[in-house]
Image (cartoon, grey):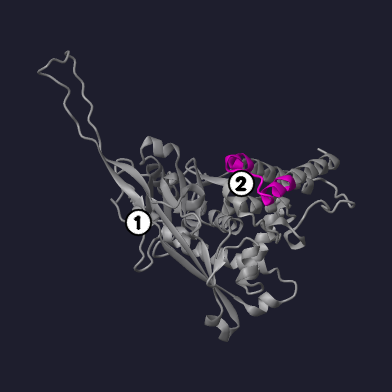
Amino acid sequence: MNRKLLLAMQKRNKKRLEELRSKLKNNEVREEDLEAVQSEVDELSEEAQEIADALENLPEEDPDNNDKDSTDPENGDAEDDPEEDQDENKREKGITPEQRDGILTAIGKGLSTRGHKSTKNKEKEIRQAFANFVVGRISESEARSLGIEAGNGGVVIPDVVASEIITYAEEENLLRKYGTTVRTKGNVKYPVLVKKATANVNKKERAKNNPIPETDIEFDEIYLDPAEFDALATVTKKLINMTGVNVEDVVIEELKKAYVRKEINYMFNGDDVGNENPGALAKKAVAFTPSIVVNLTAADAGQKLYDALIELKNTPVTEIMKKGRFIINRAALTAIEKMKTADGFPLLRPFTQAEGGIGHTLVGYPVDWTDAADGADPDVPVLYFGDFKAFKIQDVIGALQLQKLLEKYADTNRIGFQIYNLLDGKLVYSPFEPAVYRYEIGAAGPVGP
C-alpha cells in the first residue's frame, strides 16, 4: 500500500474521530448509543495505530509529510481541551460525565501523535523512560506521563523491559529454556498420580455374583506457590553520567545479570537459607547409580562411562526417554570430551542443524552444559537426563518491579536497584514416572569386575 493511500485513510480516520469527539462534547450521544460509539472509537483507534505502523515501515520517508493532520496532547489535543458542557439537563438525559470523559480520552489517544508511533518506537520510548526514571533523570510524574507505572520510589518494570530480562533468563537458564512456564496471577496446581488403578481379566461372562471389583485411583496436587524473589544491582554515577554511555543499556544489563543469577540458583539448587526450594532440580531429580563405579583416571574409563550413560538414558519410562536430553556441568563436559569408547569413538559427538548452530549429542541425545548444574563441589561431574518440560515455572503477571536506592549507596557514588518478583519453579512428576535423573560420575555403587 502506497503512502498517498495511507495518508488518505489516516485523514478519514481522524475526521471521523473528530466528529465523534464533537458529538460527545455537545452531549449528542445518548445512553442507548454508548456501546456503539465505544465500539467504533476502539476500532478507529486500532486502525489509526495500524496505519501509523504501516507509514513508519514504508521504505522511504515523505519529506513533505510531517503528520500535519495529527494533533498532539502538547499542542492542543482533545485530552487537554478546557471546554466543558455545563448543561446538566442534557447530561441527565444522555450519558454520565464519567462515561463521556472515558470515551473522550480514548478519542484523544487515537488522535494524538504519540498514539501513532510504531510499536517499535513506542517500545524504545518506554525503555528509555524506564531507564531515565530509575537513574533519576526524569521525575515520577514525567515517567507516568510516558506510560511507566511508578510511585513511592518504586516502578513496575514495563513489559518491553521485563520480556527482555526474561528472554535473557531463558538464554542463560536452561530450565527456562526447556521447562514449562505459566504466566498467571493465581496459584497453579498440577495433579500427579500417586496410586494406579488395577485392570482385570476375566474369561467367563460376568454374573451378579461376579461383578467388576472396584479399584482405587489416587492423585495428589502439587502447587506452585510463588515466593518473594529479589536481587540487588548497583551502577556507578560516573558510568551513568559519562557522555556517550547509553543509560538504558547499562541499567537493563545490570538488571539482567542480578536477576538471572538469583533465579538460576533458586531453580537448580534451591539452597538459599530460609528460602529453600524443595522442588529444585538438584533436590527433586532421582539419584542414579550405575551398576559399575566409573573411575575417570582408569584406562578403561571411556568405555565404562559410555556403558553407564547407556544405563542412565534407558532408566526413565518410555515416554520420558523419547523426550529426553542431557544437562551437564562443566566438569562433566570436560570429562566426557576427553573420553573415548574402546573402539576409539568420542563420547561427545557433534551434530548439525542444532538450535543456535552446531550442537552435540551424548549417546544419541542432545546435550547442554551450564555451571548451574554444579553440586557442592564444582569439580565433581554432574549429569541430568530426562524430560525437562516437567519443570514447571510460574511467573506472576505484573510482579516484576524495581526499587531505586539512592541514599543507601550515596557515600560510594553508586545507585542501587533492588529487583522484586514473585516466582516459583518446581520439578513436578508422578512417583511412577520420574521425569529427571541425576548422575554424579564416580558416585558410590556396586563394585564392578
Rendered image quadrant of residue 283: bottom left
Residue type at tag 1: Lys
The residue lying toward the viewer, choosing from 208 and 86, is 86
**In this picture, is 276 found above or below 113?**
below
Q: Which mark is residue 283?
A: 1
In the picture of the structure, the residue carrying the numbered disc 2 is 358
* Span highlighted in magenta in the image: 18-37
Residue beneath the point at 28% across and 50% down: 446
Q: Mark number for residue 112?
A: none
Describe the element under mark 2 as helix, strand or loop.
Answer: strand
Of residues 391 and 361, which is closer to you in this image?
Answer: 391
> Residue placed at 58% from the left, 40% from the top?
32
In the picture, measured across the screen, residue 30 lies left or right of residue 444, that is right
- Horizontally, residue 404 falls left or right of residue 244, namely left
Mark 1 in CB contact with mark 2 (< 8 angstroms): no
Residue found at the very far left of the displayed protein? 209
User: What predominant SS class does the magenta segment belong to?
Assistant: helix
Estimate the x, y position of residue 281 in percent, counting from the top left: 39, 54
The x, y position of residue 181, in whole percent, is 47, 49
Q: Quadrant of residue 376?
A: bottom left
Is 20 colored magenta in this rendering? yes
Q: How far is disc 1 from disc 2 in space, using C-alphas?
A: 31 Å
Q: Amino acid at mark 2?
A: Ile
Mark in front: 1 vs 2: 1
| Residue 9 placement, left or right of 320 | right
The residue closer to the viewer here, 287 or 267, is 267
Q: Where in the figure is residue 254, as x and y percent of width and height?
A: 58, 68
Indicate yes or no whether the magenta region holds residue 296.
Answer: no
Does residue 32 show up? yes
Element at label 1? helix
